[in-house]
Amino acid sequence: MTKFICQNCQATHDEELLNEVKDIHERVAPGEPMPAGECPDCGAVCHEDERPVYVVRVRRTWREEFTLEVSAKNKVEARNRVRVMIADDDEEIPAFEGENMPNGAEHTLLDIEKKLT
């Protein structure tokens, strides 16, 4: 699925979440690419995210592993984006499979590879 990135806050969104661009002719100069929509978070324009996608394998606690796909310029940015997602308990982080999330559960990034298209 194609993602779109905000030119201001750098948030990524699916196309159906973007708002219609208000005053588009005042916000897009001749020769500039047309935006796909307006960011629902900050109102700036969003364009297709052309950064490569990295697959990050993560281990939570001692037994549970999952993978995340993130758009990033390089492996360092991909690692940092995943760390922020974990810290913010982002909705893309899968729910813990056990009864309760163990107190002090740690996440370990196991590997990061560029997704082959």
Image (cartoon, rainbow, N blue to C red):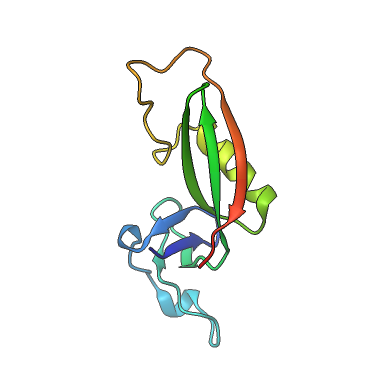
The picture quadrant where one finds residue 74 is bottom right
At x 39%, y 35%, the residue is 94
At x 39%, y 38%, the residue is 91
Q: Is residue 82 above or below residue 34?
A: above
Question: Along the horizontal axis of the image, is 80 left or right of 44?
Answer: right
* Residue 116, percent from left and from top: 54, 64
Residue located farthest toward the front when viewing the structure as drawn? 63
* Residue 76, percent from left and from top: 69, 48
Number of labelled discs? 0
At x 50%, y 32%, the residue is 88
Question: Along the horizontal axis of the image, is 87 left or right of 38?
Answer: right
Give 58 or 48, whichever is nearer the viewer.
58
The picture quadrant where one finds residue 24 is bottom left
* Residue 60, percent from left and from top: 50, 27
* Residue 1, percent from left and from top: 38, 63
Residue located farthest toward the bottom when viewing the structure as drawn? 31
Residue located farthest toward the top when viewing the structure as drawn? 103
At x 46%, y 65%, the residue is 46
Q: Is residue 86 above or below residue 24?
A: above
Q: Is residue 93 above or below residue 48?
A: above
